[in-house]
Structures are given as structure tokens and as C-alpha cells.
Image (cartoon, rainbow, N blue to C red):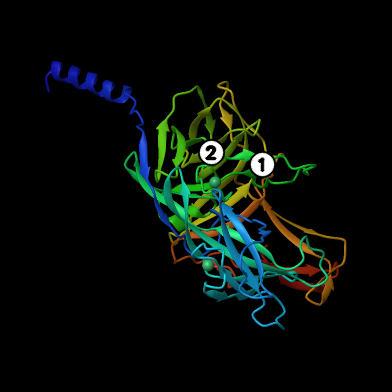
Amino acid sequence: MDKRCKRILVVLLVISVGMPVIAQTIEVPLTFQKPPQEEAGMLIGHYRAQPVPVTGVKAPSDRATVSSFTLQGRDYYFASERAKETDEFYSRLYFDANGNKDLTDDTSQEGVKEQANENVTFWRFDPFAIEYQLEGQTLPYNVKIMFIQFKQGLRVPTQGPSYQILSIGVWTGSFNHRGKAYTISFGDSDFDGDYGTRLKHVPLENAPDYLLFPLDFEGDRFCVGAGSLSSAAYGAMALSEHVLIGDDLYRLEVRTAQRKAILTPVEMPRAPVKVPKGLRQVQLVSEDMSKGLCLIEPPEVVHVPNGNYYVVSYQDATIDEQGDTWVLMATGNRKTPMVIADGGKRAEMAVGAPYLAKVSSGDTRMERGGVSGYPLTLSVQGKGKEPVVSLMRTEGTKTNYKLSTKRPNTPLEPAFKVVQGDGEVVASGTFEYG
Ligand SMILES: [Ca+2]
Ligand SMILES: [Ca+2]
């Protein structure tokens, strides 16, 4: 190689390193789909609503209670009744599928009873595919109605049946970002037919310090990740204005009626933040709680828009020796150190490993399932005192870790022994999740 050629080569290399690859606007066409049936950790689009009793609708029988829910200004009617007059609870559901305010010409469904805990029983029914109008477009929607039966004698807000109306359909699409394929899904968590409702902070009156942030937010949820919908949906985030994929900053917008999502590159002053290794997803919210920021697969140092942020939640992923992926999810609270990204010295996200397990015992005797005793609680928290809320295997089938028989893809419940000073074992057992 002669000297001139070398010089050219050097110049070319400098040019290729010095030119940043500019992120481009990404349009993601969305298709509607029913998510895998209430998989563990599927947090998209579930919403609780208390329907109001209605009049002017023909009931299927004298003992039926007619109720309704609303979607984009249209009312949808349903009725619950005891299948037999002597039945203990409402177990049959009618849905006004043809929308004529007459529930005598619709088919009915018998519920499947499921004991949720000692106080609550759910009556589950198959979901309904319905349609609604948004911005002149007819769109599909998926609704699931559940009846809630409270234990007798319990003080409950309503007499008669209480319902849970769930929005369980999601809009899903895929896109490529810097050569890698991602799946993005949106759920209508606040049940208004618009899948693009951004996070809104709702201060709870006299909220205690330990209250977790997600409970304070309204709006829709979404998830994005490499891989399938079900593994990405584990730990959906509150829909935020800005999303960082790697170190590329985008504004995220969902246009439900147009069946698409748009990721637009954004230029704004940003500051470097050091992210703990293994964190593959982080939800931040600005100090004034007005704006969310989601980090997807952040590099070790990510550049976030200048500002101070609370860590709302994160996922920490690890691959075990057999190649299975495990994802730990934690939720920050007000005690978790803020991320101060002011462009000054490099900010750090002080969360994640090491995780500490803590066992505490209550000093009030409790009764449960006919057994009386003192409760033992096992909790795990990260470096920033953020509680770990779940640990799941999201990919793979070969792990050597023992798995729970009650919860799929979850580690075996830890066992305990309570030993007296003289070595006598006074109690032993296993912890339960939840
Ligand atoms: Ca009807
Ligand atoms: Ca919504």
C-alpha cells in the first residue's frame, strides 16, 4: 500500500466513525389481537369498572340485574342472574350482543367459579368481541366481564353483584431498530377506547410513603421488547411521552383509529446516566410526575433528557447456566434514590443488585385457614430499597432451578424453619407468593 492510499484510508475511517447514524421516524402498523389468556404477569389493558344499574332495557328474567358499561359514548348492556333461584350467587351472564336494549334475544353464558382468596370468589366468562367508533372508524375491542362474590358478612360497597369489566385486547406491531426486531403492544388500561392515553399522575390522599408509584398513575400501558408478545408483556409500562431504545430518543405516539404507532426521533439536551448491568427496561417519571420516560435495553451509559427522575419500575434480566432467561421486576418508591441528570457529573441509577432478602414476623396473632399463629413475611429489595415484586423465567425450558408447582415459571417457594435457642424446631413450612 503506498503512502497516499494509507492517507485516504485514514481519512475515510475518521469520517465513518465521526458521522453519527441518525435515527429515523418509525411507523409501526398495528393489528388487533386478543392476548394470551391472562398469562401470569400479563398486565396490559386490565381495568376495573363499576357498572351502573340501568333502566329502559328489557331484562331476560325477573331475577336478573341489568347493568352497562360505556365505550366512546356508546352504552353496552349486560345482565347477571342466578341460574336457579336457589343458587348462592349470580352465575349467568347475558350480553346484548345485537345492541337492541333487549336481553331476551341474546344467548347466555354460565360462569366458571374461581376462589380468589378466602373473601373473594370470581365468576369468569368468555370474552366478548365488540365494536366501537373512534374518529369515524369502526374498531374492534375485546371485553371480559367477571362477577365478584364477596364472603357473606363482609362489608362491601355494593349490595348484589359487583363486576369487573376488563379490556383484554391489545394492538400489536413490530419494527426494526438498528437491525434488531422488536414487538410493541398497547393496552387500553383506562378503558376509553383510545390506546394512546399517556400516564397521568393521580395523587392519592394521604398516601403513605411506602406506596408504590404505579398505583398513582392513570393511563394506558404498553410494552416493547425483542421477542414475543407474551414475554415482552411481562411488566408492561405506563405509556410515556418519550422512549429511549438503546440510546436513541423517540417521542411515542399511538393513533388508534389509524391503527398505527409512531416513534419520532427527538433532539433535546440530554445528560449521561450510568445504568446497572442487566437492566433491560426502566420506567422513569419526571420529578413533577408529569412526564414518563421508558428505557428499553439501555446501554451502560444512556443519555436521558436533562432533569430529575424517580425510578418507577425496572426489569433486571439474567441468563442462567442452562441458557434460560430470568427476569426480576422491582418497583421504586419515594425512598429510592432519584436519578439526577443535570448534565453535570455523570448521574447514576442507584438500584438493582445486590438484592437482599428480609424475613420479618408480625406480633399480632392471625387466623388463616383454621390455623392460628404469627405471620412470617419474606421480602426482597434492591440497592435503592426498591421492593422486588416478581421473578419469572421468561424464556427457555432447561433450568436447573426448582420451580413452583403453583405458579408457572416461578422459582420454588422458599422453605423456612423457626428454631428455638436450644435448637428445637418450633415451626417449619414454605412461604407463599402474594
Ligand atoms: Ca339483544
Ligand atoms: Ca386509553
How crowded is the residue under tag 2: few (<14 C-alpha within 10 Å), some, or many (20+)? many
Identify the residue position indicated by label 2 in the image: 240
**Residue reaching furthest right?**
364
Ligand 2 within 8 Å of the CB at mark 2:
no
* Residue 103, above or below 230: below
Q: Residue 175 placed where, x, y %?
A: 35, 44
Q: Residue 122 placed where, x, y %?
A: 65, 70
Q: In the rendered image, which quarter is residue 23 located in?
A: top left
Q: Amino acid at mark 2?
A: Ser
- The disc at residue 278 is none
Q: Nearer the viewer, mark 2 or mark 1?
A: 2
The residue closer to the viewer here, 33 or 434, is: 33
How crowded is the residue under tag 1: few (<14 C-alpha within 10 Å), some, or many (20+)? many
Residue at image point 40% right, 46% down: 259
Q: Looking at the image, can residue 320 be seen?
A: no
The residue closer to the viewer here, 43 or 385, is: 43
The residue closer to the viewer here, 95 or 21, is: 95
Residue at image point 75% right, 45% down: 210
* Residue 28, above or below 66: above
Residue at image point 79% right, 63% down: 156
Distance, label 2 to label 1, CA atoms, is: 23 Å
Identify the residue position indicated by label 1 in the image: 384
Q: Indicate left or right for 430 with 390 as reference.
A: right
Q: Amino acid at mark 1?
A: Gly
Q: Residue 128 placed where, x, y %?
A: 50, 64
The quarter of the picture where the N terminus appears is: top left
Helix, strand or loop under label 2:
loop
The residue closer to the viewer here, 227 or 101, is: 101
Contact check, label 2 and label 1, Cβ < 8 Å: no
